[in-house]
Image (tube, grey):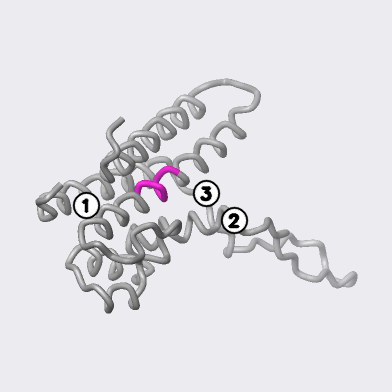
Amino acid sequence: MAQELYTRTNQKIFYAGLSLESWRKAQEGQAMNALALVQAEREAALFHLYGALLGLCHEIAGYYRLPESNAPRVEQLLCKTVLDAAPSPELAELVELAQQPETWLAQLLSAYAELFRPPHAAKRAKVDPSTPLIETVSLEEVPPLARETLEAWRQQLAGLARRFRETLSEW
């Protein structure tokens, strides 16, 4: 494989697609461990999407010869200090997307960070023995990410990479 920066981004986008396809097959299958397969593919897809984003950041940092071009984490590149030190339209767009919680990029970063948080027990209301036993439903539970959501993020990331590459003409 060529050692160009864009090859890693393309590879990770492709791998995310493979994980999403395996996830679809696991959902459709009748395997005893289908739920575990779905969870594994969800995590694999998130891992590869994050890697693709990091690859895209490396492409931009390499093109503009930023000192942080070898940063091992996206968050080290998508910050105001890096943008202020070396402004670029591509990096500015990524930083803006990452800082707005409702955007797909901020949600991707949040979902990836969630992979590294320890599991926590569901919150339970204290039960008063004199009251009838009524189960309380917590609305704070966040449902797991849907495959379609991650596929949409993959498409957004691939489109962003194509668009950025058109402006980064010396590749």
50 inside magenta stretch? yes
Task: Locate residue 140 relative to residue 21 in the image: left or right.
Answer: right
What's the CA distance linking mark 3 and mark 2?
A: 15 Å
N-terminal of the pair, mark 1 or mark 2, is 2
The location of residue 125, given as percent across then percent down, is 75, 69
Q: Residue at x 33, y 40 (%)?
A: 13
Of residues 124 and 106, which is closer to you in this image? 106
Q: Residue at x 24, y 57 (%)?
A: 60
Instruction: Give the overall secondary structure of the magenta segment.
Output: helix
Task: Locate residue 2 relative to residue 27 in the image: left or right.
Answer: left
Please state the extent of the stretch shown in magenta in the rendering.
48-52
Query: Residue type at mark 1?
Result: Leu
Mark 3, mark 1: which one is toward the viewer? 1
Query: Residue type at mark 2?
Result: Phe
6 inside magenta stretch? no
Residue 144: image tag: 3
Quadrant, the N terminus: top left
N-terminal of the pair, mark 3 or mark 1, is 3
Task: Locate residue 85 relative to residue 22 in the image: left or right.
Answer: left
**CB within 8 Å, label 3 to label 2:** no
Q: Secondary structure at mark 3?
A: loop
Instruction: Classify 10 Å Cα crowding around label 2: few (below 14), some (14-19), many (20 and above).
Output: few
Q: Secondary structure at mark 1?
A: helix
